[in-house]
Image (spheres, rainbow, N blue to C red):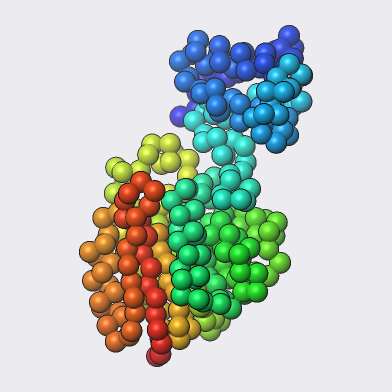
Amino acid sequence: MTNNKKLQANKLIKTNREYLKYSLDFSNENNLKISKNIIYQILIDVNNYKNYTDLVINFDKNLAKPNDFIKKINLIIDGKPLQYALGYSYFLDFKLKVNKNTLIPRVETEGLVLLTKSLIEEYKIQPKSIVDCCAGTGCIGIALGNSYKNSNLFFIEKYQRTIDVLNYNASQYLNNFLILRGDKTKPLLKYNIKADVFVSNPPYVDNLNTIDEMVLKNEPLHAIYVKNGIPFYNNFFKYHKLFMNENYLMVFEIGEDQKDALTKLIVKYFSDEKIEFQFKKDIYNKIRYLYIKGFGCKI
């Protein structure tokens, strides 16, 4: 719900320090609970400073874009995440555009990328083709594409408005990529694309009560929630022989309570192959990742 109380422009307020105090006073008077850190981030952004140190050095200089600052603070007042107010989010070393059509990249997904890179090195894979399925902002593929520049990188995304953001982000960091619009693995099958490495953070939450209220109100639900939790994995596993090369690596972000269900799917769809698979924990010590290493995938 939009908050009726808005921060107004004030011609008497000039400096960064004054805007900080003005915003904090307004927040406290109206019980809005806007943190000082959020205000710092917006001040850094509208002044185009590099970091907090730049802000401190210039605290008593005039704010560069007062109207922009007021607009972004009011988005926070309306309950928008800081990343949407700023229009971008950081993922590892990359600054990525985000908006209401994209899921905000999480630290857990950074872990997914780091795990994938460690597995590529462990198994001495030299990937010629990498797929980021359910790509969203493109954070996974962009990070992997920058590490393996000789690979052909394919993004799969279903929604055009999300693709617009994905294309912008990928174009900032990659020279060699292709975006395929479609659901799950259908584009790979349609164009007979084979992957060495397949990575995905698909929607896997099947209980709306476990989703944070701010996420429910702002982020695209189709990127988070799916009935029964595992239909994407079922699709990936069922058709993997049709789009994975003979020796392959598949890595997924998963729900912490899905280990048993996914193990059953692995037994069902990979029983005639030589594979290694393992579930891994995230930085919060929750089961969050699954990888499957195949040794000789043949139809």
Residue visible at 61% across and 26% down in the picture: 40
Residue 132 screen position, x and y as percent: 52, 66
User: Foreground residue, 143 or 185?
Assistant: 143
- For the C terminus, which image quadrant? bottom left
| As drawn, 99 above or below 73 | below
| As drawn, 124 above or below 261 | below
| As drawn, 138 above or below 86 | below
Residue visible at 43% across and 71% down in the picture: 250
Residue 247 screen position, x and y as percent: 45, 83
Left or right of 103 in this view: 298 = left
Q: Can residue 106 be seen in this snapshot?
A: yes
Q: Where is residue 222, by image quadrant?
A: bottom left
Residue 227 screen position, x and y as percent: 31, 57
Q: Where is residue 49, by image quadrant?
A: top right
User: Foreground residue, 133 or 219?
Assistant: 133
Left or right of 39 in this view: 199 = left
Residue visible at 30% across and 79% down in the picture: 269
The number of numbered badges drawn on the structure is 0
Residue 81 screen position, x and y as percent: 51, 36
Residue visible at 70% across and 56% down in the picture: 172
Q: Can residue 68 be seen in this snapshot?
A: no
User: Foreground residue, 30 or 111?
Assistant: 111
